[in-house]
Image: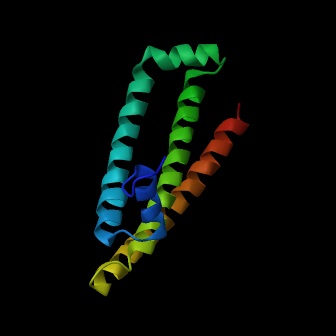
Amino acid sequence: MEVSATSPSLQKMSFIRGSQPLWKAFWILYVLGSLSFTAIFVVLIKSLSTSHLLLQASHILNLQKETALLTTATTVVVIYIMYFLLCSISVWRCAKNTMRNLWANLAKIIISINFAWISWKAFVAFDSLLTHFSHQ
């Protein structure tokens, strides 16, 4: 069985290898993908915090509702960080695939600033998680 050149796994690998155009890596993966992920995350957390599903899951797992919500949010954030790293690597490597160096440099600057901001936020959040779980 042959894998076609347009299969989803080959498409993903072409982004990671840096063989896609910069605009695709930046606008589709980095911007639209991140916005979609954030919107889904907000809806998920909002609906879980007000639904009985989380309450039932917390009873089954013998956790408090806040701990179950915090665990769910932490899991989603870890998945987002992995997605963010994949997108950042893709944009950085695809930056060479543009006609103007201005766009390549601008994309790398945006990636660097966002990486620094997310790293700081992850550090602060990790410290908050440690504080929360150490008081239980």
Residue 54 lies, in percent from the top left, at 50, 20
Vertical order, 58 against 113 (above or below): above
* Left or right, residue 71 beside residue 43: right
Pick the residue in front: 12 or 23.
Answer: 12
* Left or right, residue 44 beside residue 59: left
Pick the residue in front: 35 or 25.
Answer: 25
Residue 91 lies, in percent from the top left, at 41, 68
Task: Tell which residue pokes out farthest to the bottom in this image.
Answer: 101
* Left or right, residue 77 beside residue 123: left
Q: Quadrant of residue 44?
A: top left
Q: Quadrant of residue 49?
A: top left
Residue 128 lies, in percent from the top left, at 61, 46
Q: Is residue 43 visible?
A: yes
Give the residue drawn at x 27%, y 83%: 99
Vertical order, 35 against 89 (above or below): above
Give the residue drawn at x 57%, y 49%: 125
